[in-house]
Amino acid sequence: LISLSIPGVPPSGVSVWAQPPGGQVALGDRLVLNCTVATGTGPLSFSWHRGGSGTPLGTGPRLELRHVGDKDSGQYHCRVSDGDSVAESVPLNVTVL
């Protein structure tokens, strides 16, 4: 049995979309952010960040904020890693109305 080592494709083309669309959410409502990756092989890990904060808000391809407050507005981005390389999404601006 011969095993071939196939180099992984690093994650790229990371994008974030929001529900409700555009990231405009009423105070107290629910906001769901989804992170999608155009290319990337192997086990990918996801983390969510707001602004310049290094502490992840969550892990996984989906971030759900159940009751949005004033402090939740800002720029959110998703960071995807395959263990070797990291790709980040363009920040999505969340506005609490």
Image (spheres, rainbow, N blue to C red):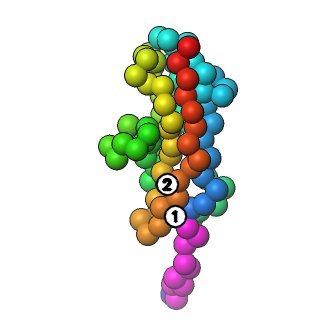
Magenta segment, which residues? 2-10
- Foreground residue, 60 or 19? 19
Magenta stretch, main secondary structure, is: loop
- Foreground residue, 47 or 25? 25
Picture quarter containing residue 94? top right
Q: Is residue 44 visible?
A: no
The image shows residue 22, relative to residue 89, as above or below, that is above
Q: Is residue 9 magenta?
A: yes
Identity of the residue drawn at 58% across and 37% down: 92
- Foreground residue, 28 or 60? 28
Query: Where's residue 88, x and y in %?
Result: 53, 53
SS assignment at label 2: strand
Identity of the residue drawn at 55% across and 72% down: 8
SS assignment at label 1: loop
> Is 16 displayed left or right of 58 in the figure?
right
Foreground mark, 1 or 2, reads: 2
Q: Is residue 7 magenta?
A: yes
Q: Earlier in the sequence, mark 1 or mark 2?
A: 1
The image shows residue 25, relative to residue 83, as above or below, that is above
Q: Which residue is mark 1?
A: 42
Dot label at residue 80: 2
Q: Residue furthest left?
A: 55
